[in-house]
Each structure stands twice: as C-alpha cells, then as structure tokens.
Image: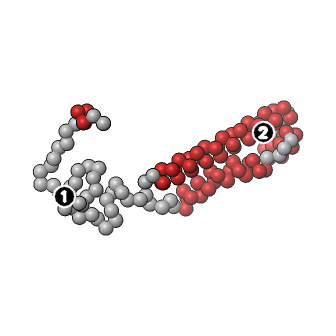
Amino acid sequence: MNPGLLPPRREAAGTDAPEPGRMPGGTDGTPVPPGGCDGCRRPEPAGPGRRLAGATGWLMPGTVLVLMPKCPACFAAYLTLATGLGISISAAAVMRSSLIVVCLAMLGFLILRLARRRMAAKWR
C-alpha cells in the first residue's frame, strides 16, 4: 500500500489503548485480557438451531436426489399424489430435470463453501 494514501493516525493523549489493529500488550506494556483481545477471539460455537440449519442444507438436496424417481411418469404420479395437481409427462420430465440441476447446483455450492472455509481456517 502507498503510505501517502492513508490518513495520518491521531494519537490520543493519556490513553493506554493500543493502536487499532494491534494486539494489546507487548511494546506498550498494556496487559492482554485473559480471553484475548476482541480481534483475535474465536467466534462462539454455533447453537443447535444453526447446526440444524447447516445439516438441513446438506440433507435436503441429497435426499431429493436419492428419492427422485428415474422415469418422468413416476415423477408425475408422485407429484399428483402429493399435491393433487395432474401434469403431463413432458412437463414432469422438465420439472424432474430442473429439480436435479437445482439440487446438484446446491450441493456444488455447499461443497465450494466448505472448501473455502477449510482453506481459510488452514491459513489462520
């Protein structure tokens, strides 16, 4: 970075706070709190609701792909039984293909997000 582009730092007289972005303690003698500073604390573990939502994100597309019938006629029959709406075989084929593409895209997104998180955790 070009130091000329950054605004000059303002030093507050009489404060023991370290500069923003620096760990407390060290050269200025400020003690480090027992839990660490706010910038280096790990996030709180996810609660049960967040873990359930994360698991559902993986389970829904996988379950849909596993339970998806192979023939469009069966898909149309299942859709009719579940909703009471009858559709043609050609419409069922398009809906089945679209649902497969959406589920695969969702699983791909989840895999990429997991890989990105693991790479970020590796470099911390």
Estimate the x, y position of residue 94 in percent, counting from the top left: 78, 33
Left or right of 42: which side holds 114? right
Q: Disc 1 versus disc 2: distance between alpha carbons?
A: 65 Å
**What amino acid type should be assigned to the residue bearing mark 2?**
Arg
Q: Tell me which residue sits at (23%, 50%) in the image.
A: 19
**What amino acid type should be assigned to the residue bearing mark 1?**
Asp
On screen, 113 above or below 87?
below
Q: Nearer the viewer, mark 1 or mark 2?
A: 1
Estimate the x, y position of residue 52 in percent, counting from the top left: 59, 58
For this rendering, which residue is in front, 68 or 110? 110
Position of the C terminus by quadrant = bottom left
Q: Tell me which residue sits at (74%, 41%) in the image.
A: 100
**Secondary structure of residue under mark 2:** helix
| Residue bearing the label numbered 1 | 28
Left or right of 8: which side holds 55? right
Left or right of 76: which side holds 11? left
Q: Residue furthest bottom?
A: 34
Image-quadrant location for residue 18: bottom left
Left or right of 101: which side holds 93? right
Residue 80 in sight in this render: no
On screen, 51 above or below 8?
below
**Secondary structure of residue under mark 1:** loop
Q: Earlier in the sequence, mark 1 or mark 2?
A: 1
| Residue bearing the label numbered 2 | 96
Position of the N terminus by quadrant = top left
- CB contact under 8 Å: marks 1 and 2: no
Estimate the x, y position of residue 53 in percent, counting from the top left: 59, 54
